[in-house]
Amino acid sequence: MSQSGPLEGVTVIDLTRVLAGPYCTMVLLDLGAEVIKVETPAGGDDSRSIGPFVKDRSAYFMSLNRGKQSIALDLKAPADREIFEKLLFRADVLVENFRAGTMEKLGYGWAELESRYPQLIYAATSGFGHTGPYAPRPAYDMVVQGMGGIMSLTGHPGGPPTRVGSSVGDITAGLFTAIGINAALHHRHKTGRGLKIDVSMLDCQVAILENAIARYFATGEVPGPIGARHPSISPFEAYQTADGHVIIAAGNDKLFAQLADAIGAPALASDKRFVTGPLRNDNVAALKQAIEAQLTGQPTAHWLAVLEAAGVPCGPINNVAQILSDPQIADRNMVVSAVDPVAGELKMAGNPIKLSAFADPVSRGRPPELDGDREKILQMIAGGDETSLTIERLTRAERDWVGELITARNGSTIFFSNGKRHDVRDCPGFVAREGTEPVGLLTYDIEGDSCELVSLDSLVDDKGVGSALVEALAVLAQSEGCGKIWVITTNDNLRALGFYQKRGFRMSAINCGGMDVNRQRKSGVPLIGKNDIPLHDEIVLERTL
């Protein structure tokens, strides 16, 4: 079950397992995409066997995969490969996190995918990427944290190697992959073509070293662990109080003066050792001693109230239980739930991306059973099997029948697009039949060397007749000497936009407010797309023949 969001209509085939890839596809699902998880028949995603467990169900797996669908396929078995390839035909995005070279061995490397599914976006997340001497190596989060430098900066001077407490090696790779996928969807909007996205977990660790890289190249010195403090800003660390610690982040001279006043030591702001940021950083040990001399006289709660009142950025050091019960987290809906039929209700982290036009529900879809959505998925791709269809040109006598069908579905036979009025009863077209039963209609209009696709209707839900009708139109248009087919959809009809982009159309123009202009031309006439947001921009899509 996908959430409502801007990626509505985007279908993601998810070959990933454990953390980096599932985290990426979870983000996409929370933004509205439909995610179909393809798992191995022998046990599925490895994380199904990773604890903690609730009634023998992995809470770890459920928290990363709630809302996704699951089908078990052996990609070395011909029958399962056929199912997988039908899924790829319908998909917008394929995500995998195998070791480099695995997809090529299966026959689904980028060269094969690009030639067979030109609209498909292929995202590969791996330990070391698909190039370079380390490409064939396997990796886990711990490996890239160690290799990538982040562990050398974590902990206290002289202490043992310390892993960051969350799996930042996996999670950053998942996030960067999701960013790349969204950029690739935008690219496909413009060009009609998919892309390969190659994300290395090690690269991602280097990308988040930020200040450490700047310091190394600026000074030539190798940064090391410095505990809780910031390497370049002071005061900016955890400070001892009477009963614990408080985080203080006074990042400029004004905030430092406010801090000094608030803790009852205003002279610190004029102390020659501390009057500027660089001086405070040079004398960080003395500064910490002076601040803690004040703070240790009162408990943390006292200082939090005082510092917040003074406008100084500060906070407690929460444990997991404390942050999950914080009212700010509750207000931001950052703890959501999903219901598993065996484990019951499971609470998990919510989506930090809040979007003004979309709801942020408190519940998420159920975690998938291994192969639990097979029947639904097979029905979906069977519905898209167009080999049994017969495509015929509409006869003139059939146009009134078409008019009746269109009126029953849309309320009128009239369409406006790009300022032009069309009556589908006057337009030539095609009908798709399964046996003698009509299951789809397409109407068009040819002017000069271009062909406009006026209307496209599936008369049977989930029958998937659109591709066959569009291809029939392409053949006809070429025979008529047309150089392109163009069609108009709208900014609030994402499913139609995705459908055409998968079939070689690229965005060529946006007529801002075009729908509203057409409404003024003739009130009451149904318009292409939905009518539930104030602005109705027309998006012009073209396919070169």
Image: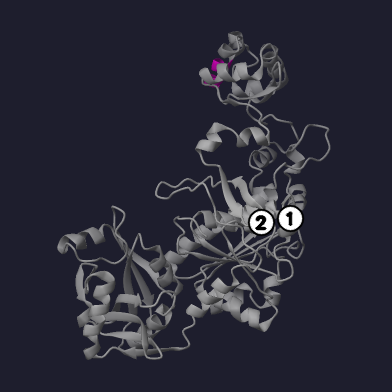
Task: Judge by depth and name the residue closer to the eye, 273 or 406.
Answer: 406
Image coords of residue 64 (percent x, y)? 63, 54
Q: Are marks 1 and 2 in contact (CB under 8 Å)?
A: yes
What is the C-alpha distance between the residues marked 1 and 2?
Answer: 9 Å
Image coords of residue 499 (percent x, y)? 42, 71
Span colored in magenta: 253-259
Task: Name the element at disc 2.
Answer: loop
Q: Residue at x 38, y 86 (%)?
A: 472
| Count of picture labels | 2
Among numbered discs 1 and 2, the one appearing first in the sequence: 1
Amino acid type for the residue under numbered disc 1: Asp
Image coords of residue 320 (percent x, y)? 67, 36
Does residue 179 appear in this view? Answer: no
Q: Residues within 10 Å of mark 2 (few under 14, many from 20)?
A: few
Mark 1 = which residue? 56
Our reading of the magenta stretch's main secondary structure is helix
Inspect the magenta stretch and tell me whether residue 430 lies in it: no
Image coords of residue 202 (percent x, y)? 70, 53
> Does residue 23 sit above or below 383 in this rendering?
above
Q: Residue at x 62, y 61 (%)?
A: 368
The C terminus: image quadrant: bottom left
Task: Judge by depth and name the residue closer to the eye, 227 or 320.
Answer: 320
Mark 2 = which residue? 342
Q: Which mark is residue 490?
A: none
Q: How is the image coloured?
A: one colour
Residue 362 shown left or right of residue 412 in the figure: right
